[in-house]
């Protein structure tokens, strides 16, 4: 006889309700994200109508409404179809080395195709060479040493100050472009190509980090979603793509170095420290990349490679400081400079939540649904992947609350938002192609309906 509390009808009803509620909850999360974006646009337009200069033509994005097509339209669609159809299968079946070897050119091709939707000249040639950007200051740099020693003197808005993007960052990023110029790789084309080449490694580094932490199955499931993350629209072309690539590579090397437990591991850990140390001098906000490093260190718990990694960071900090640039002084001056410019008229009360609407567009519906499912059942994802996801969310929240990110976060937060592809591994494998389609469609719509600027 069947007991009342274990009746066959009860056993069948529970799964059916769960099966019904899960897609309904997913739909509500997506609608909530869409509502946030719509609300940010409506309130932003109201602010503009009232004469509040938020310096956005299409709030909350730093973009202009301009439906268009371009040379990259057809290649972008074809590459998206390739990833949607073959990505999940190849990610599951290929050996690790060949998988990464295939993923990189596909990622680069997808990024370049999205960029070319805006055309060669606007999308590539002039993106980094306008008067407000880094390349405009190269001729003012006689030597790297003299640039470093006098860098802070030109941060504040006054005659002779650096261009907007140079003054808003530590000197490391200008150093990169100066070095490129000195070896014959000057100009907008070389700079844009370099940013895309480095930025395309971001997804591979995230996957390598997961694998080093013993979560290769998560890395494999995540890879196609990392490639088609809508944030790729802003990766090409922006210096923040380079920042994302360098930072993620530093974390990947840290994970590899601290899990090996041999002399080669120590060398890799030291290299990771040097790279992460230099990351601090690419953008002040990248200090939050330390959250990902803490996750790796907490999971590996090997003292010797940690000491090598810390030594690498210290070496970079000492070198910059000895040559005349003190990071904390630069940051304090940048806070002043930030509010000497457009940040002064951009209301914190609007951007503190409208920024999150930008994150919705960068992350896409697959990430929203993944975060919802992860929140209701955290153990669906391995510990390392969970903690890296939390690190990304905390970094975004900290950057948002700091008041130093008023708009343009669709680009500025790429070193954090790219890691939001990780929780997509919780999505059922049978649904991967559908969610990849949603990600690709959103990216293509954004790139064809608006002109992104920075």
Image (tube, rainbow, N blue to C red):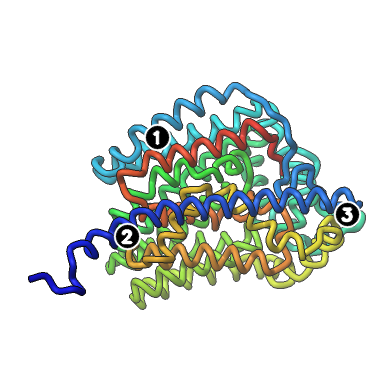
In the rendering, at what x and y percent does residue 211 appear? 32, 57
In the visual, does 95 lie left or right of 181? Answer: left
Left or right, 99 with reference to 104 = left
Q: Which residue was labeled with disc 3? A: 52
How many neighbours does mark 1 have within 10 angstroms: few (below 14), some (14-19), or many (20 or more)?
A: many
Which label was assigned to residue 212? 2
Residue neighbourhood size for the residue with mark 3, other residues' Cα within 10 Å, grouped as few (<14), some (14–19), many (≥20): some
Identify the image quadrant of the C terminus: top right
Q: Of the residues under marks 2 and 1, which one precedes in the sequence?
A: 1
Give the side of residue 249 with respect to residue 153, left or right.
left
The residue drawn where x is 52% and y is 55% is 29
Please tell me whether residue 303 is drawn above or below residue 388 in the rendered image: below
The residue at the point 50 percent across, 62 percent down is 274
Residue 282 image offset from top left, x and y in percent: 63, 57
Q: Which residue corresponds to the image point at 52% horizontal and 68% vertical from the top-left? A: 290
Looking at the image, residue 378 lies above or below residue 187 = below
Q: Is residue 267 among the parts visible in the rendering? A: no
Of the residues tagged 3 and 2, which is closer to the observer? Answer: 3
Q: Which residue is mark 1?
A: 83
């Amino acid at each position: 006889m069947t007991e009342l509390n274990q009746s066959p009808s009860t056993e069948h009803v529970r799964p059916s309700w769960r099966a019904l509620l899960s897609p309904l909850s997913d739909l509500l999360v997506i609608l909530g994200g869409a509502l946030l974006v719509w609300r940010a646009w409506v309130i932003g337009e109201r602010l503009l109508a009232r004469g509040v200069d938020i310096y956005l033509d299409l709030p909350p994005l730093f973009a202009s409404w301009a439906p268009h097509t371009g040379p990259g339209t057809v290649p972008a669609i074809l590459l998206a179809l390739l990833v949607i159809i073959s990505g999940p299968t190849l990610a599951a079946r290929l050996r690790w080395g060949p998988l990464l070897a295939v993923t990189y050119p596909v990622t680069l091709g997808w990024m370049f195709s999205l960029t070319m939707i805006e055309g060669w000249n606007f999308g590539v040639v002039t993106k980094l060479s306008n008067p407000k950007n880094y390349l405009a200051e190269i001729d003012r740099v006689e030597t790297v040493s003299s640039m470093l020693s006098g860098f802070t003197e030109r941060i504040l808005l006054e005659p002779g100050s650096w261009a907007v993007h140079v003054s808003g960052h530590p000197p490391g990023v200008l150093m990169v472009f100066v070095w490129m110029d000195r070896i014959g790789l000057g100009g907008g084309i070389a700079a844009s190509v370099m940013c895309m080449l480095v930025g395309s490694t971001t997804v591979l580094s995230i996957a390598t980090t997961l694998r080093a932490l013993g979560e290769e199955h998560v890395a494999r499931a995540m890879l196609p979603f990392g490639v088609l993350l809508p944030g790729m629209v802003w990766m090409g072309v922006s210096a923040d793509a380079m920042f994302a690539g360098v930072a993620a590579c530093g974390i990947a090397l840290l994970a590899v170095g601290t899990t090996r437990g041999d002399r080669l591991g120590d060398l890799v850990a030291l290299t990771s420290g040097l790279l992460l140390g230099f990351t601090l001098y690419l953008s002040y906000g990248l200090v939050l990349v330390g959250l990902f490093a803490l996750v790796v260190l907490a999971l590996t718990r090997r003292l010797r490679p940690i000491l090598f990694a810390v030594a690498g960071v210290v070496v970079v900090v000492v070198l910059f400081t000895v040559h005349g640039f003190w990071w904390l002084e630069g940051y304090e001056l940048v806070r002043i400079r930030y509010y000497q410019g457009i940040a002064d008229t951009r209301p914190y009360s609007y951007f503190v939540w409208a920024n999150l609407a930008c994150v919705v567009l960068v992350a896409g519906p697959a990430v929203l649904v993944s975060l919802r499912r992860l929140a209701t059942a955290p153990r669906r994802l391995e510990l390392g992947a969970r903690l890296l996801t939390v690190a990304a969310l905390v970094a975004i929240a900290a950057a948002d609350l700091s008041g130093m990110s008023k708009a343009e976060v669709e680009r500025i937060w790429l070193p954090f938002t790219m890691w939001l592809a990780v929780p997509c591994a919780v999505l059922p494998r049978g649904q991967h192609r559908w969610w990849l389609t949603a990600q690709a469609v959103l990216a293509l719509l954004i790139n064809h309906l608006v002109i992104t600027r920075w």
